[in-house]
Amino acid sequence: MSGSKILNITPKCSDRSSLQRGPTSPIIAAYWRPIVLVFLPFAAGYFLSYFFRTINAVIAGQLTAELGLDASHLGLMTSV
C-alpha cells in the first residue's frame, strides 16, 4: 500500500468540464421538446382567436354602420 497512488476525484473550481453541458443537456431537451411541440401551437391558436374576437368587438360599431350588419351577422363573422 505504500507504493499505491491516491487519486483526488473531487472536481476543482477550475475544472469546468462537468459544467459545460448546461441547459443543452439531452435530458433537458427531451423534457422540453414535447412541451414546445404541443403547448405552443395551442397557445398561439388561443392568442390569435382571442385577438380576432377582441378586434371585432372594438370595431363592431364601425362594421355595423359601414356594412349594414345586424347583431347576428356580426356574431357569425366573429365566430368564423
Image: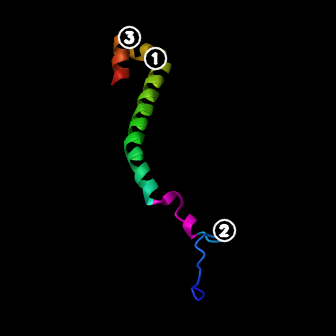
| Disc nearer the start of the sequence (3/2) | 2
Q: CA distance from mark 3 to mark 1?
A: 9 Å
> Is disc 3 placed on a helix, strand or loop?
helix
* Disc number placed over residue 60 in the picture, else none: 1
In this rendering, the answer to whether 17 lies above or below 73 is below
Q: Residues at badges 3 and 1 in contact (C-beta under 8 Å)? A: no
Relative to the observer, which residue lies in front, 49 or 9? 9
* Amino acid tagged 1: Ala
Q: Is residue 4 above or below residue 73?
A: below
Q: Is residue 55 above or below residue 32?
A: above
Residue sitting at 37 percent across and 13 percent down? 69
Q: CA distance from mark 3 to mark 2?
A: 69 Å
Disc 2 target residue: 13
Residue 63, percent from left and from top: 43, 18
Which of the two discs, 1 and 2, labels the residue nearer the N terminus?
A: 2
**Mark seen at residue 71:** 3
Q: Amino acid at mark 2?
A: Cys
Q: Does the segment drawn in magenta span residue 59?
A: no
